[in-house]
Image (cartoon, rainbow, N blue to C red):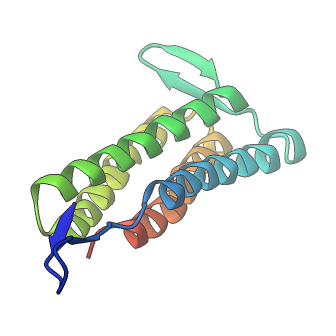
Amino acid sequence: MNTVTTGSDLPATTARPARWPGRLRAVLAATAATLAVWVVAVPLAGVDLVARTGGAEQRVTPVAVAVSTLLAGLAAWGLLALLERFTTRARPVWTVVALIVLLVSLLGPLGGGVGTAARVTLVAMHLVAAAVLVPLLHRTAAR
């Protein structure tokens, strides 16, 4: 907490704004958005959403979608918090790292989706998660 000297003997404190509510909303919004993509693709459009992990094929469930998005969002939040603690350029550094992570993450669905519809759906989930997380977390970053 920073202190500012005032005319009185008591220091006035300047509180940092609470960032966690906006960050929590960003993570939850990204999770809801990826689940919405799953609902549109799987039950409504009938996409057989199967991903190849290693040598095995695995059905992508809504639980897997939610957990994956939550973990990615929490990791993004954690990295942003660490960068804010150790650098004055947290916002631009985090944004560049987030976009690089997005590009790397797309390699999984592009190479691991079983069938074109599954690939398109998995890529859409990655893009939707990033489209929500990156701007919303970016907005909460210290300037």
Most extreme residue toward the front is: 9
Front residue of this view, candidates 113 and 21: 21
Position of 25 with respect to 72 (left or right) is right
Name the residue furthest left: 87
| Quarter of the image where one finds residue 12 | bottom left
Percent across and percent down for residue 93 are 18, 64
Figure quadrant of the N terminus: bottom left
Q: Depth check: 5 or 94 in front?
A: 5
Residue 29 in the image: x percent, y percent? 63, 55
Q: Position of residue 108 (x, y in %)?
A: 42, 37
- Residue 58 visible? The answer is yes
Q: Which residue is located at x 55 percent, y 35 percent?
A: 113
Q: Seen in the image, is 115 located left or right of residue 40?
A: left
Q: Quadrant of the C terminus?
A: bottom left
Instruction: Determine the residue positioned at 36% across, 48% down.
Output: 76
How many numbered callouts?
A: 0
Res 122 quadrant in image: top right
Query: Is 120 left or right of 127, judged from the image as shown?
Result: right
Query: Can see residue 114?
Result: no
